Amino acid sequence: MLPVPVNIGRLIVFMFELCVMAQDNSNNKIMKTKALLLLIIFSLLINFSIKAQNKDSIAVMKSATDFVTAFNNFNWTTFRTSFTDDATIFYPFWDQASRIEGRQERDTVWLTIFPEFVDTKNTRKLHINPKDLKIQLYGQTAIVTFHLGDGVNRLSRRTLVMIKEEDQWKIAHLHASSLSKNNN
């Protein structure tokens, strides 16, 4: 898949140069035919690349949205399956200052911080509302970044590194950090 827009820009310039070369060598029918054939092939590649990236962007956005919705609603099953089995996490809390690795450790920490996930009588809902969301695609990897909070006195930052696993985008790493305005 081609990273957009840099490589597409280069391809367009290259195709333009091929067309100019073909016109300069107007006596050479083979050159004109090759240039036209390459132009068609590159146009198709660009078209498929853009469609694939748009499809992946939509799928990444859906996976990220499903994750946040599951978190807000304490839906343990959907939340838990949002991660790869070997996912790592950096939490924004001192009590979990070291990297959390693997499903068992991750599940234990999440359920310690948020017992609501398994409390059948829980009616509490979170109000996680991502702001300034950005998706960056790199083949089978996506980076999703967003902010939480008002951005005036407190700002929390989140990064989800997602990978495509069997046609599903899953979180391979979650990095959470928080900043507070110094009132001194």
Image (cartoon, rainbow, N blue to C red):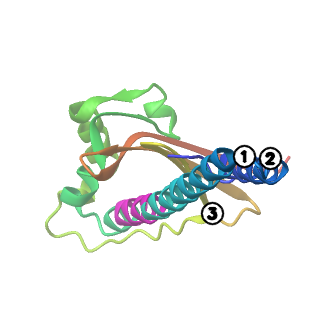
Mark-to-mark CA distance, 2 and 3: 62 Å
Tell whether 140 sits left or right of 122.
Answer: right
Q: Is residue 72 above or below residue 98?
A: below
Q: Kindly indicate the quadrant of the structure image that contains residue 121.
A: bottom left
Residue 33 left/right relative to 62: right
Q: Could you say where residue 85 lies in the image, as x and y percent from the top left?
A: 24, 36
In the rendered view, tell whether residue 183 sits above or below residue 148. Answer: above
Which residue type does callout 3 highlight? Gly
| Magenta span of residues | 56-67
Q: Nearer the viewer, residue 123 or 78?
A: 78
Q: Tell me the residue that label 1 is attached to.
A: 28
The disc labelled 1 sits on which kind of residue? Answer: Asn
Residue sitting at 23 percent across and 59 percent down? 78
Assess whether mark 1 and mark 3 are in contact (beta carbons under 8 angstroms).
Answer: no
**Looking at the image, do the residues carrying marks 1 and 2 touch, with CB atoms under 8 Å apart?**
yes
**Label 1: how many Cα within 10 Å (few below 14, some 14–19, many 20+):** few
Q: Which residue is mark 3?
A: 149
Q: Nearer the viewer, residue 19 or 97?
A: 19
Q: Is residue 78 left or right of residue 51?
A: left
Q: Residue at the top extreme?
A: 98
Residue under numbered circle 2: 25
